[in-house]
Image (cartoon, rainbow, N blue to C red):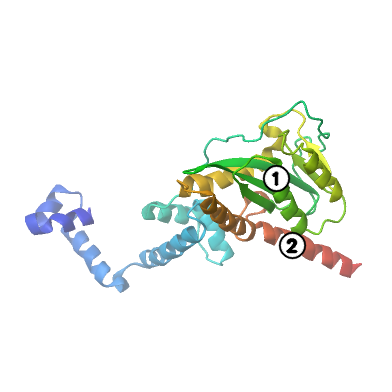
């Protein structure tokens, strides 16, 4: 209403407009006086103004994908004392909102003619340590120059993305490159299971040989629906929601590759995940190793 009065006060005057609107002239003049002199604002208004700046900062620093709960969690991590309902109210006033998930799409093509490993996971996507269970999957991205494909390998313990690759081809080289990155980046010690769906890329001879060379046990979903690889599908869904659908359309592979690099770095090091206590994956893994070191010292 104040902005409406500002737009028409020259033509009609403040008092005549206020007679038609549910606002007193004194209220309008007080509002304009507070705009010129913030010290006249109430304590709540002053606090709201400062909180709005912090809320907008957190939202923008996190790819503009966080909803009120995630923004509230991040503010608490930064030692701001604020109620979740306050964050919700101020985000509404700012016109800020989180992204919403879209429908899932499946990229890998099952090949029942190929021999496949047993299902060692049986839809139990949990781990008590890093490098105990990895899940892998592929998704696609439409660009102006044609489809490109993105492969991810995720460590189930902290949802840490250990390997990824972008390619124009769905051939086995796509998943092999992601696997090479994952093996190179992690110190594999002890039993490790690699789980995927029944896509022909993951059942190829080269891929199974690469897993065997690294001492990794292969596992493939036995039923052949999305629930057999639900956690990997979840990560793909977040990627498509937070990057691909939000920031498209995409011109070429290079654009997708750079955006994926940025997102993976943010996801691993700064994104808050509810499933691990609203902390980033790297922090969750660090807590595990710190507890392990403390137990060794105590022994």
Q: Percent x, y for residue 200?
A: 72, 34
Q: Percent x, y for residue 177?
A: 70, 50
State the residue in front, 121 or 39.
121
The picture quadrant where one finds residue 53 is bottom left
Residue at x 78% of width, y 47% of height: 133
Q: Crowdedness of circle 1 by 10 Å Cα count: few (<14), some, many (20+)?
A: some
If you read the primary sequence from the N terminus, does the residue marked by circle 2 or circle 1 appear first?
1
Residue at x 44% of width, y 64% of height: 51
Q: Crowdedness of circle 2 by 10 Å Cα count: few (<14), some, many (20+)?
A: few
How many numbered discs?
Answer: 2
Q: Percent x, y for residue 109?
A: 67, 31
13 lies left or right of 154:
left
The picture quadrant where one finds residue 120 is top right
Taking 134 as reference, is 33 above or below it? Answer: below
State the residue in front, 220 or 156.
220
Is residue 271 among what the camera can see? no
- Residue at image mark 2: 287
- Residue at image mark 1: 173
Residue at x 79% of width, y 63% of height: 289
């Amino acid at each position: 209403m104040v902005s409406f009065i500002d737009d028409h006060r020259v033509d009609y005057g403040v008092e005549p407009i206020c007679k038609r609107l549910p606002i007193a002239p004194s209220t309008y003049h007080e509002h304009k006086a507070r705009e010129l002199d913030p010290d006249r604002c109430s304590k709540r208004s002053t606090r709201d103004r400062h909180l709005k700046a912090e809320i907008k900062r957190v939202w923008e620093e996190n790819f503009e994908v966080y909803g009120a709960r995630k923004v509230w969690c991040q503010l608490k991590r930064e030692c701001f004392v604020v109620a979740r309902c306050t964050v919700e109210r101020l985000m509404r006033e700012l016109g800020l909102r989180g992204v919403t998930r879209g429908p899932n799409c499946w990229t890998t093509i099952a090949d029942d003619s190929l021999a496949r490993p047993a299902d060692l996971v049986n839809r139990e996507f949990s781990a008590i340590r890093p490098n105990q269970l990895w899940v892998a999957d592929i998704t696609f991205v439409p660009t102006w120059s044609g489809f490109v494909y993105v492969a991810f390998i995720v460590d189930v313990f902290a949802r840490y993305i250990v390997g990824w690759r972008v390619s124009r081809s769905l051939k086995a080289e796509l998943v092999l490159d992601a696997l090479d990155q994952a093996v190179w980046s992690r110190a594999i010690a002890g039993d490790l299971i690699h789980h995927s769906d029944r896509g022909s890329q993951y059942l190829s001879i080269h891929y199974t040989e690469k897993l065997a060379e690294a001492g990794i046990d292969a596992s493939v979903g036995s039923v052949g629906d999305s629930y057999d690889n639900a956690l990997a599908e979840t990560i793909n869904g977040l990627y498509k929601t937070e990057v691909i659908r939000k920031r498209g359309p995409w011109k070429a592979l290079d654009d997708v590759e750079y955006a994926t690099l940025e997102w993976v770095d943010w996801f691993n090091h700064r994104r808050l995940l509810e499933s691990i206590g609203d902390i980033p994956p790297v922090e969750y893994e660090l807590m595990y190793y710190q507890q392990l070191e403390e137990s060794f010292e105590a022994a």
